Amino acid sequence: MRTKLSLLTICLATTSALAAPAEGELPGIEFPAGDTTAKAGEWVLTVNKLMYDKFAAEPDKKGVIFYSYQLTEPGPKVSKFKSMGKEDSAPNLLVIPLGTGAKAKVGDIVLTWWQSGSGMQRAIVVDAKDPKQPVVRYLDLDYNNPAKSRDNTTTIGQMDEQLKPDSFALLTAAWQPGTTVACKDGKDFRVLDVLRVSGDKVLTKGFVGKLAAKPKADCTPMPLKPKLKVGDKVQAKWTSVVRSGVVTKIDPKIGRVWVKFDKLADEVAVAYGHVIDKL
């Protein structure tokens, strides 16, 4: 009996060791570790260790949330940052650099964080009197979210906010970290956020922060600024999947397209990056 238990223990330990990801890689996700361009002192969007450990314990079930931190020590596969006054770290695959010195103009799409809240956000610039500290409207907050902003009047999906210097990166091209793609998922397409591309794979974040590596060939970049007009038939994000609809209104200043989805009664204000003419 003891021999059988010992052999079982050895087998379980061996299996666990084999399943452990190499440094900088992610459990349950086949994607190579990578370096980072972020430098010490710069803002990055990343995942703290507490949340990472929960994800690592159940990668098929748990998602992650990206928060803003200042990098303290970039590494070839894993980088360090301060979190709640303590040193923390994350694989570079989950470290998105924001860089320094960016200047924006009205209409630019940027990657940042919700600066009076938390979490990674795309945003459109609505005022660039100070191009290093532009005023933006967040795109990844639901337009009709009823929660009030700090002024206790404007709702969070319709609030404007001024960004701090060096706290945003300009989104200008497909496949950049922070841009969006529509990836095949059985009969459906799902809208996912790009985290990193390596060869023929793209590392993505989806609904409730679920991480996945997708074949690049199965994904289509969603346009940063779709060229549409009222009456156009489109494919747009509905919750997390793509559904067909018709454009009823466009407001390019705030980066929203109102879509009447097929078989749904209401119009929905869909953000830029979540709508495309066809797939």
Image: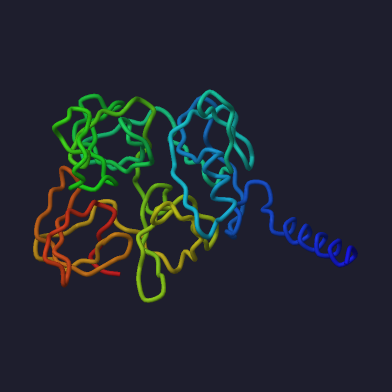
**Residue 169, x across and y down, in percent:** 38, 37
Residue closer to the observer: 87 or 23: 87
Query: Residue 63's spot in the image, x, y percent?
Result: 47, 52
**Residue farthest along the right direction in this orientation:** 3
**Residue at (45%, 68%) from the top-left corner?**
217
Residue 198 lies, with reference to residue 23, above or below; the image says below
The residue depicted at 29 percent of the width and 53 percent of the height is 273
Which of the 4 image quarters holds residue 234?
bottom left
239 horizontally vs 196: left or right: left
Left or right relative to 62: residue 118:
left
Residue 231 horizontal side relative to residue 42, left or right? left
252 over 113 or under it: above or below: below
Whole-percent x and y of residue 107? 21, 41
Picture quarter with the C terminus? bottom left
Q: Please, which colouring scheme is shown?
A: rainbow
- Asked whether 94 or 230 is in front, the reply is 94
